[in-house]
Each structure stands twice: as structure tokens, then as C-alpha cells.
Image: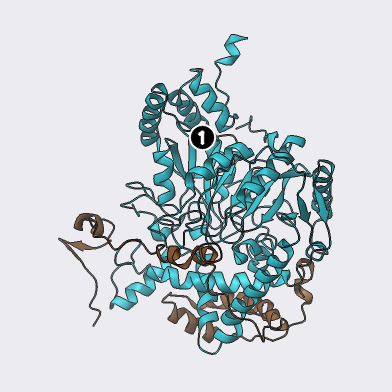
Chain colours: A brown, B cyan
Amino acid sequence: MTTIDSVSSLSYAMRMEISEDDVLHVAELARIKVTRAESREIREQLETIFEHFSSLQDIDTEAVDPTMHISGNQIVLDHVDREDVNQNIRADLIEAPLDTEQVLQNSPRRENTFIRTKGVL
Amino acid sequence: MAEMDTEIQLGQNAHTHADNFRNGTYSPVELLSKTLDNLEKLDTQLNAYISVMRSEATSAAERASSTIDSGEATPLTGIPIAVKDLLNTKDWKTTAASKMLSTYVPVEDSTVVARLKAAGAVLVGKTNLDEFAMGSSNEFSAFGPVKNPWDVSRVPGGSSGGSAVTVASRVVPLSIGTDTGGSIRQPAAFCGVLGLKPTYGRVSRFGVVAFASSLDQVGPFARDSYDLADLLQVISGYDPKDSTSSRIPVPDFSSQLQHGLDGLTFGVPSDMLSSGVDPLVQSAFEESIEVLQANGARINRDIRLPSIEAALPVYYLIAPSEASANLARYDGVKYGHSAELGESAEETMFNTRGEGFGPEVKRRILIGTYALSAGYYDAFYLKAQKVRTVIRTEYEEALNKVDAILTPTTPTPAFKLGAKLDDPLEMYLNDLYTLPANIAGLPGLSIPGGFVDGLPVGLQIVGHSFSEPTLLRIANAYQTHTDWHNQAPDLSSY
């Protein structure tokens, strides 16, 4: 296992190799413009970070289910009847929505009651 | 000394102010005026605030004064409070310390802010933080770093750095932060105040800018356990607008404060402390254990959390993965920063996100996107969720034997500004002791636990789900027998 003062002496379960092209590809997926200079620095950092992360492979999880979410409702399940839990879904009532002006007030580009963008199709 | 009695002491706790309001010693308006002057004077050095709500606060203090006159005050009526600038405030800029949201004005209050207002608290301003709450030093703010009031060449911790600093520097007695991996407890430890991350689901997250939704929780800062209990009381409880908020009834958080330590057993996970802790932090921690033991607590050093060091990779895979999804909403169309229109909608979006996000936010979005991308999902994201189960189970088993688990809050005291800025992994390692409570959804409280070289260190108490009354009881007992929480940084030169 890793410790705080032995980051550099990790025995990696998996050697990670991340290329600058990988970084640019991931940035493309994340819709973030990254310059070549940024991608060089990020590449190095991601490689170090993911090498550290690969220590997870040492832990046996053969018979373990993933925890997707620690829901307040799941915690309730242990304590209260299921029927009560279903009430955690809020009542299906019609409420006053935000008015148009409120919805649009933070939009960077408005024309009347529309938001202006470049063509998306 | 009648003259002294009328003097407003800004360093007083909220319950003392409330007594003084009730006795007519001074009014919320008078307290606020002095608070705002002090805030503005200190903030030129500390940079704890992104915005100050001078006129809104004055109106709220005037309303509070008449509420008190009519005898209908709550414990928070008229009390100045600061809120992390990650929580929406209606008609008042909420920036998440990001260029992306630097002009964003919410149309609704977050539930926590609405509850504070309803209780009569006086919001004085929005506190500085690491951008989108991603950071452990408060250096990743688009509005500049926050300084530690104990030593302005050091970080206050993060991401809720401003909220910790403003309470530590005695500007306000109370504040609100959020904690995804330690963002309340770690700055509380670095600044010498109390900070609580409640059980996941205890406090509504509605209207809080999302970072990692399975880990995020809102919580209080204060300087003593009574104030912390009063503030937690106001913000806790089910909210129809947040389906992850719990329907478990909210207990009276003050009811057990004075029950003492008799009958309580605390676990000290020796394997967790075997390496990496600053020896001086370790001895401060052992002294705290002795105080608790001397006052009736039993200590069990045989509990085991063998997978604890995996908390770091688990957290830094799950949180960025969730963040990469949550932050996909910032497209420069509906709200927030927008780049100049490019050739296409897509180009505008790339530029918007390239310009609007700072370096740490970009890094985390890229980590998350990478961990979720084809070919790596099973090895990283799914694996992290499975190890999350392992860590949760180990905590459940340990907590079957004890009432709470004690550790130092952080492995070291506050570090120098810039010391870890260029080494993300070093920065992440600083969170090792605080991450597991978020991973397991458990409540965690950091209380002032001594000093190392003139810098405060924290004692962390992690308990069973929804055991906040027990955590507050432990804190109160500890504070009865120690004086760390009453020590204030010397700010007289500012």
C-alpha cells in the first residue's frame, strides 16, 4: 500500500502511459480547448496520478458490488418501511414555474425571449 | 464596569450575542455595523470574501432587531453569518470562485440559505473558495487565494477556506461550507475552528453548485459546540427539492451536549496512523486522546481499517468522474461565461470551457473523462466504486465496536502558499484522513485539537450515520477540558 511519504517509491500494479494525443482526445471528449503547452503539463500530471490510482488493482474486489450512491433514501431503507421511502419522491403537484425573464436573465446572448447561438444542426 | 458591558465583543460566540440581544445590551444593527467594518479591514489581508452584502445585511439586521423586540427570536436571529459562494443566493451573485460563473445571479435561494434567512440570521457575505470547491488550499480561486489568519504566508485549507477563516479571525461566529472530501474539516483544522460534515442526506443540497453529487454535503463552521448545534439545527432536514435528503427525523442537536464521555468508546485506527503523519501532529493527537480518556472515555486501539489508503484513489476517481458529468452543463449558452461566437456552436463551447475553467477544474474534468472513457471504465471508475464498498464495509465493521473513530484531521498543519501548487498528487495526499467519511457517507467533525509550531491542528471524530448528537457531545466534553478553541490569531497589526 502507498503511504504519504512514499509516493515516489510506489510499486505500481500497472504502468500507465498517457500520451499528449490521449490528453487532446480526452479534452475533445470533455469539450475543453487545451493548448499544446497545457497538454504537455497535463500529460505528465495525469500519468503520475493514474499510476498512483492503479494501486487499487491490489485490492481484491472479486465478490464485491460497486457502491453507486450513498443515498439518504438507502440509509432510510434500513430504518423505515418501504412505503415511507416512496414518499421521498416529491408530490406530483403543479407549481408556478419561473417566469421567462427569470429563466433568461443569466443568458449571455439574448434576443427578446430567445437565446442566440451558432447553428447546431 | 458597566461601560465594559455595553462594549460589543466581536469574538463572542453566537449564543452570547443572542443573550446580549435579548438583554438589550446591543442590537443586531449595532453588531452588524461593527462586524462589517472589521470584515472590510481584515479582508484586505485575508481575502476571505468574494462579495459583501452590506445593504442586504443591514435590512436583515433591522428586521432581526424588531423580531427580538417582539420576543420571537430564534438562536440565530440577528447573528451575522457568512456563506460559501457555492450556495445560491437569490438576486445576489454566486460565483463558485470561477470565471465561468463570475456574473451569475441565481433566481432562487438554495434551501440552506432560505432556512438561514427564515431563522433570522444576517448574511454578511459570500466566502471565497477553491473554484467549484475543487482544492485543498484555497489557492485555486479565480478571486485570489485566501490567507491563513495564524500565518498569512500559509494556506487556510480548502475548499471552504473563506468560511473557516472568517470564523477563525472572529469576524463572524458562524459560517456555512461544503465538504466533498474534507472541504469543511480540513480548513477548520488549519484555522482552529469547528467544522462538521453531516451525514450524507442530513442537509439539503438544493441550490448548491454541484461538484460530486454522491459525496457533496453542506455543513456548519463555529467556534464552540453550542453554536455548531444551533446552526446544524436550522439547516438540517428533509427537502422535497433534494431527493437525496433524508426523511429521518431531525433530533434536538443540543440535547446531549452535556452528557459527558462516560460510557463512550472511541476507536483509534493504528494502521491508519502508522506512517505519514507529522510526529508533532501525532503527539498533539495522543494528548487529545489522553484528555478524553481522563474524562471517562474508553479507547480501543484494535480497530482495523486496512484499505484506508485506497481512499485517495477511490475519491480522486469517483469525484472527478462525477464532476466531469456535473460540469458538462457549462456550455456558455444558458448562463455563465461565454466565449466570443466562433465558427460553430461547438467551437464556441470549446473556447468557453477553455477560458472559463481554471487549471484544477480542467485537470479534474480531464481525470474524470479519462476514467470514464472506453477501455478504462472497468479498470478505474468501476474498480473505485467496488473499493468504495470495501471501505464502507470496513468502517461499518469498525463502528460496530466503537461509538466513534478518532484521527488527526490532517497529517500536517497548514502548509505554505504555493508549496503544493505544482504537484497535484501531493496536494491530494493532504486529504487522506478526511476522504473516507465522504466515501462512506458518514458524519465527520473536526475540532481544535492543539497547536504545532503556533499553528492549529484538528481532532477528527467520525461517527455512525446520523450520529451528529454524539459527535457534538464529544466535542462539548473535549472543549470543557481544553482551551484550544478559545485561542484567537493575533490580527491587531491589520
Q: Quadrant of the image for the N terminus of chain B?
A: top right
Q: Nearer the viewer, residue B6 or B490?
A: B6
User: Which amino acid type corresponds to the residue marked 1 in the rendered image?
Assistant: Leu
Relative to residue B35, is residue A94 depicted above or below?
A: below
Q: Chain of mark 1?
A: B
Give the residue at x 29% y 57%.
A106
Query: How many numbered circles are shown?
Result: 1
Whether residue B57 is visible to the viewer of this picture, yes or no, is: yes
- Quarter of the image for residue B54 reads top left
Q: Nearer the viewer, residue B210 or B303?
A: B303
- According to the picture, the residue beneath numbered tag 1 turns out to be B39
Q: Position of residue B2 (x, y in %)?
A: 59, 9
Whether residue B354 is visible to the viewer of this picture, yes or no, is: no
Which residue is most to the bottom?
A: B375
Q: Nearer the viewer, residue B300 or A44?
A: B300
Q: Secondary structure at mark 1?
A: helix
Relative to residue B22, is residue A20 depicted above or below?
A: below
Give the residue at x 43% y 59%.
B209
In screen coordinates, is B235 left or right of B278? left
Q: Position of residue A44 (x, y in %)?
A: 62, 77
